[in-house]
Image (tube, rainbow, N blue to C red):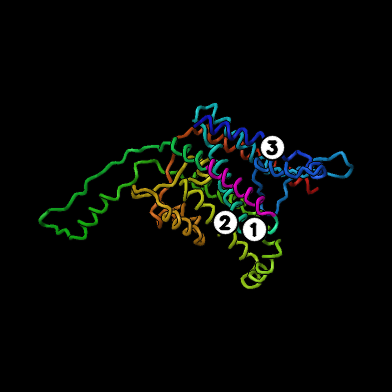
Amino acid sequence: MKNKITIVTIIYCLLSIPIYFLDFESIVKNNTEYLIHILNFFNSIRFDFLLFENELEIPLDEEGSYRIIPLNSIIFTLILLVGSLLYFVSNEKKTRLLRLSLLFFFIAKSVHLFFLLFNITEIVKKDILLMLYYIFIDIFWIFLTYKALVYLNSTKELIPVEIDLVEPEYKTNATERVSAREIMNQSFEKKATPLPFKKASLGDRFLNYVLDTFFVILIFSPYIFGLAKSRAYRDSINELGAEIGENVVFLLFIAIARIIYYLLSEGIFHVSPAKALTETKVLSSSEQQLSFTTIVGRTFVRLIPFEAFSFFGKNGWHDELSNTTVVKNKQDEKTKVLSILFLLAIFIASIINGIWDKF
């Protein structure tokens, strides 16, 4: 399975990056548009940070003309390529960047498929066969990514910890009376033992929150602002904004995006993209198998105002109310630091490029 994952991801990356540098205008002029659709089989996902334009402009032979290349998509492909190479060279030990990229890819492709089906009536009017082809592309990559993530997650091991189980001491002194309620409480405390795995640190929880919020905005920004620009939905959005306020509408979209994001990641794999980077995962506190309905409850609790600050206590509200916890996988701390520094370096370079283009 290791070889299959590595081969597919490397082939995808090597074919994806050159697509952005092709001269599509000449392809169209030569009446070979079908080549564009064939090449789009390996086309990378597109994402943005709100309305922050981050593109490369490559001058063409014709004076004053440029080819626009989405830098963010190239960055994602680069992270996926580096992650797959590290995974192969380390003999399946270094999986942070690979799992992060594949989870990001799985969510982005699933959201793209949803919006593709959402606008299916408009697309059918144009070309139904072409529409079915692009639906097949999304389903194909979603399936392969799902299989790879299931395998990668199965190779992870949790960090065990020793739990001291202390038997409750019932008071039997004749001079002291013990109520039935106290005995029941002591019996309950005996059964409610913590999980024998190391819990995620406060730093990991904070990093998970920050990165997952950033990833949500990256994935959903094109669709949120795309709907706002669409004639079909612009009037409805403007009317809703007039009723409850434009800022509230935007926050509502972000809330819906967060729900979809966590249901697709934690609901299916029990791991979000940020948790893949910090080597943490969600478990049920009661040692039962974590169900999808539990993740649904956990996800909706996140929408409570100021809930993000609750994890500074013993347990966050979305853990406490859903009876879940976040635990650590066995990991290499050096790899964690290098992975974070690598991501920061390329994203900072991306931001600098975007700012530079505005001057």
Q: Is residue 334 magenta?
A: no
Q: Are marks 3 and 1 in contact (CB under 8 Å)?
A: no
Identify which amino acid the numbered label 2 is placed on: Ala
Q: Is residue 232 left or right of residue 293?
A: right
Measure the alpha-carbon separation of dots 3 and 1: 26 Å
**At x 50% / y 55%, what residue is drawn?**
309
User: Which segment is the magenta one?
Assistant: 127-145
Residue 17 shows which numbered tag?
3
User: SS at mark 1?
Assistant: helix
Q: Are marks 2 and 3 in contact (CB under 8 Å)?
A: no
User: SS at mark 3?
Assistant: helix
Measure the alpha-carbon separation of dots 2 and 3: 28 Å
Residue 42 place in picture, x, y as percent: 65, 40
Residue 225 or residue 142, whichever sits in front: 142
- In the rendered image, the residue lying farthest to the right is 63
For disc 2, the neighbor class at 10 Å (few under 14, some 14 to 19, many from 20) is many
Q: Which residue is mark 2?
A: 257
Can you see residue 339? yes
Q: Are marks 2 and 1 in contact (CB under 8 Å)?
A: yes
Measure the alpha-carbon separation of dots 2 and 1: 9 Å
For the residues carrying marks 2 and 3, which lies nearer the camera in this image?
3
Identify which amino acid the numbered label 1 is placed on: Ile
Q: Earlier in the sequence, mark 3 or mark 1?
A: 3
For disc 1, the neighbor class at 10 Å (few under 14, some 14 to 19, many from 20) is some
Q: Which residue is mark 1?
A: 224
Residue 192 place in picture, x, y as percent: 29, 50
User: SS at mark 2?
Assistant: helix
